[in-house]
Amino acid sequence: LKIDVFRSSGPGGQSVNTTDSAVRITHVPSDLTVTCQDEKSQHKNKDKAMKVLRARLYDLEQSKQQDEMARERKQQVGSGDRSERIRTYNFSQERVTDHRVGLTLHKLTLVLQGDLDEIIDALTVYYQAEILKQGN
């Protein structure tokens, strides 16, 4: 924090012109500046400026966190476009297609009854390959 004191301006007569009662506090990392010259005493102005600065820094941090959460949420949800489909269940052809790995099985009733081993194995291989790609 960088704290500057100076003479306040405006009405107030002789006391305003002769005392350094106004306070300017600058938060160096964020370059946020708060000025206070409402009170007659430098200490009261400093306390008031610190409260205002604390509130502004809190608001700034809150907005950063909200932006980050919104960005993460948007990444997770997707756009709802048909190109983002994961799996298709075609009942008339007794077919299940997992579009992430390109796996098509012609045993829909077995999959719906819980026989997911082939799908899980294919997804495991796919995600392990993705992790290896990211590691290199």
Image: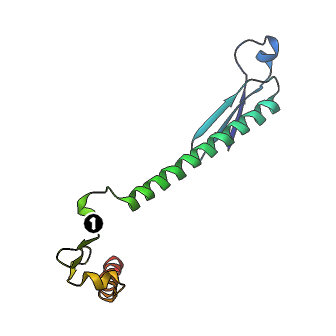
Q: Nearer the viewer, residue 132 or 37?
A: 132
Q: Position of residue 95 (x, y in %)?
A: 21, 78
Q: Where, by quadrant of the figure, is residue 39 drawn?
A: top right
Q: Nearer the viewer, residue 5 or 71?
A: 71
Up the image or down, 92 lies above or below 40; here it is below
Element type where label 1 sits in the image: loop
Could you tell me which residue is drawn at 78 percent across and 26 percent down? 21
Left or right position of 32 against 96: right
Image quadrant occupied by the C terminus: bottom left
Q: How many C-alpha atoms fall within 10 Å of the one at disc 1: few (<14), some, or many (≥20)?
A: few
Q: Position of residue 10 (x, y in %)?
A: 70, 14
Q: Nearer the viewer, residue 91 or 130?
A: 91
- Look at the image and name its color scheme: rainbow
Image quadrant occupied by the N terminus: top right
Up the image or down, 40 lies above or below 56; here it is above
Q: Position of residue 103 (x, y in %)?
A: 22, 81
> Residue placed farthest to the left in the image?
93
Residue under numbered circle 1: 85
Q: Where, by quadrant of the figure, is residue 102 drawn?
A: bottom left
Up the image or down, 37 lies above or below 117; here it is above
**Amino acid under disc 1:** Arg
Left or right position of 91 against 14: left
* Number of marks in the rendered image: 1
Up the image or down, 22 lies above or below 118; here it is above
Q: Position of residue 47 (x, y in %)?
A: 78, 36
Left or right position of 57 against 70: right
